[in-house]
Image (tube, grey):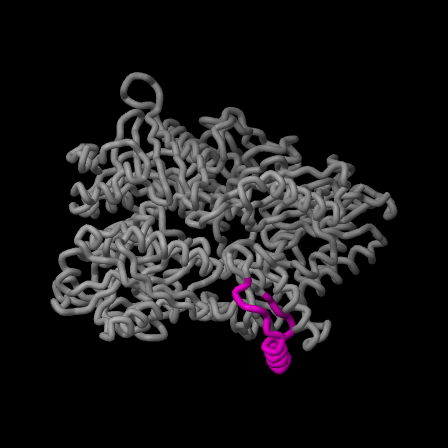
Amino acid sequence: MHIGIDVGGTNTDAVLMDGTRTLTGIKHSTTADVTTGIIEAIEGLRSDHPFDDADIESVMIGTTHFINALVQAKRLAPTAALRLGLPATRALPPLVDWPQNLSEAIQAQVYLAHGGYEFDGRPISPLDPDELREHARDMAAHGIRSVAVSSVFSPVNHDLEVEAARIISEELGDDVAISLSHEIGRIGLLERENATIINAALRELASEIVDGLAAAVRKQGIDAPIYLSQNDGTLMDEEYVRRYPVATFASGPTNSMRGAALTSGLDTCAVVDVGGTTADIGLLINGFPRETANEVKVAGIRTNFRMPDVLSIGIGGGSIVDVETAEVGPESVGYRLTEEALVFGGSTLTATDIAVASGAASIGDPSKVAHLDPAFVQRVLSRIAERIAEAVDRMRTSPDPIPVVVVGGGSILLPDTLPLFGAVTRPENYAVANAIGASIAQVGGEIDKVYAFSAGEREAKIAEVRAEAVDLAVAAGAKPSTVSIIDFDEVPIPYLPGNATRIRAKAVGDLEMGA
Amino acid sequence: MSWTITADLIPDLARGAAVLGTGGGGDPYVGALLAAQALAEYGPVEVVSVDEVPADAVVVTAAMMGAPTVMVEKLPGIEEVARPVRELSEHYGAPITHIACAEVGGVNSTIPVVAAAALGLPLIDGDGMGRAFPELQMVLPTLDGIEASPLAYADEKGNVGVLRAVDNHWVERIARVAAVEMGCSIMISGFQMSGEQAARALVRDSLRTCLQIGRTITAAQDAKTDPVQATADLLGGRTLFSGKVVDVERKTNAGFARGTARLEAASAATDGTGEPDRLELSFQNEHLVARLGDQVMATTPDLIIVLDHDSGEPVTTEALRYGQRVSVLAAPADERWHSPEGIELVGPRYFGYDLDPHRFDGTVRLQEAGA
């Protein structure tokens, strides 16, 4: 048996699972402190479905703590950004495009030093250890407690980041955490560096939260290992979270999509989550969310770490319906639905009123929408179905048919069949889908680097990269026999001569669970 | 009428430049950031129309040569942009008086802003292409007999060179090798011309056009009107097609991102076959040929522009992928590109497509020189 817990901004879901079978699930309001929420969740499960502590093999937790800390600019450590690349990149120093409140919140100190590589791996300039030591002493003088190290083209060669970290660590001591950009992001120096700085600023909080979570679970008498979900849906252990808290940022939507898929028995599908204001559409391929290829802004900062590609359109249960055109949204009454919607005695025509008028839902007082013209109601519903279908079509990566799973409170707006896609699936148990998503026990490893190789070396290079990804997955705790490459791509870099190619491979396997 | 570039104009300028980049030129983000930084450091840049440049002015272009993908990693510096211009000035023994854009698409619209700001020189509202092309000799000044040599180039390490070659094709070939050796992103300056030559050889009002395009798209987004049609109107072009990207095929070939993209219309064509219309785009960094079924709709040198169907944001060839809803526009290039010499330099056959050049409106008005 294992436990999945998803700590969201509003609700904390928890499930007790036996393999992929949900034994029980509960929902609580999220508490201000981590510990109490986890204790309440486990106690809730225990009272619904008593279990023996020793039978719990692992506890998986998804949390929004870290992204919230960044968005609220709270509990961030004083952080230094050290970039290796001089004499290149001087004009656009680290944090160049950050919102001021956040660079102040991390009490940022910025340093440029020699180092870095060209696109083909030749050095730009050698490291200057004295320069690094001087920077480190200045960091210490400014009370810096966490450092982000970035280096030009470190996805091609990361040696200098590692060496610079060693040198500054000698000056700063072991208490100052160091985050390296090649471990966090991909090509695109500013975006990778930004993600690394965010990670650095969260590392103290990460230790606090991991300690808190572990203490809460242990207090419940459970000795099983604890894992946290990351953006792509795979798990990381406690030690990994302490080092890479930023990898939890998008675990919310990911767990929700994976949970929806698992409860409907599908592993390649589109998931449409219709809430009060928006419908969020994502794609699962072999059980993992399709990730965005573009830069993603987090709290106003441009980053390029891998996030699930989610398309939000302004259609939800609270969306305002235009009585003339039958168009829906993007304006929504939001949380005021129970005051403003017609069925609740309000005066605004919302999508929920349309659902009630059509007989698809029975909420509030149906007599308040009895006057609506059935033809108009039908027109609104068709329009919603058409727009959702178009959005799903926009998200899919090939014309092949793909099943559509619809979830969320607003999914009453959708018909049982969608244009282009046919019948939709509505999973049961969806209320705790996030926790179910968190409980899926898989771990992975990923390589994303630029390689320059001659035409004859291509096959060998690809095989090498794939093997490296598999090794990483095994190192992360995957059962070797279950590991496979779930994602692979090879993109030539334009305008570059030769065959500079970015290769990305991701391997995933089932978590080796202790008995 | 002279005007001033300030940091607040940069986003619209960069967006307009990406539209005129016709799919090439890379992500404009870094170039825009560098321009904003240069303006903050050195103050606003004065922009003068080609008519305001004195006949005896000493004008040079400033540009980046290499791979925009490298620029997002090895970020360019302000000093290395200004350096080749200084070097040319030293080489001539006379001060440079004006900076011009060689190319108005992609990052090379913002690099000259950086040079002008850092050097305190006025920037000419004009460029050598009126769009983006991949090679250095592909500028109208080449047609006008203006030599790219001496061409100065610089990297961030302090390496500088001044190159004299027998013609502009040779400048491209030799400078390209230097660019690769120097890390695949170098800054160049050349094409020295007098004010009189600049007024004759350059495409007029390019920067103003970029700004207008950027503003038009922003305004259409804000007013929720159609940004695609507004852009087509502004450029005097037409919308060739609206539909979904159904296939993108890329090949690497000598450092160029060659490929084709297939688009499918949302509904069946009216020709009675019941099949939806399909548009095929052929690209080599930039979009070069658009075909609807068997019919050629437009080719280089006219502009083939891909915009996101809803937002009107330009889509680069690198970013094209299945499922995108896009509109494809064709717009007229500068008339001089349609001369026999212009077609020889940048027509479809130069890029390996055995086609007569088709204008943005689908017509063929000129046979290639010697054909």
Q: Residue furthest front?
A: B166
Q: Is residue A17 left or right of residue A352?
A: right
Q: Quadrant of the N terminus of chain A?
A: top right
Return the residue nearer the eye: B285 or A440.
B285
Q: Across the whole image, how many numbered discs are drawn on residues?
A: 0
Return the residue nearer the eye: A456 or B227.
A456
Note whether A347 is above or below A261 in the view shown: below
**Based on the displayed image, in which of its 4 quarters is residue A63 positioned?**
bottom right
Q: Magenta region: which residues?
A: A123-149
Q: Is residue A16 left or right of residue A275?
A: right
Q: Residue furthest top?
A: B272
Q: Tell me, yes or no, if residue B106 can be seen here.
A: yes
**Based on the displayed image, in which of its 4 quarters is residue B146 positioned?**
bottom left
Residue at 51% over, 56% down: A119
**Based on the displayed image, in which of its 4 quarters is residue A443 positioned?**
top right
Q: Position of residue A141 (x, y in %)?
A: 62, 82
Q: Is residue B334 left or right of residue A150?
A: left
**Residue A267 is covered by the magenta coloring:** no
Note whether B113 is above or below A347 in the view shown: below
Return the residue nearer the eye: A310 or A303.
A303
Q: Position of residue A303 (x, y in %)?
A: 51, 57
Q: Residue furthest bottom?
A: A141
Q: Position of residue A172 (x, y in %)?
A: 68, 76
Q: Tell me, yes or no, if residue A409 can be seen here.
A: no
Return the residue nearer the eye: A76 or A409.
A76
Q: Position of residue B220 (x, y in %)?
A: 28, 49
Residue at 58% over, 29% down: A425
Q: Quadrant of the C terminus of chain A?
A: top right
Residue at 23% over, 36% down: B357
**Residue A142 is covered by the magenta coloring:** yes
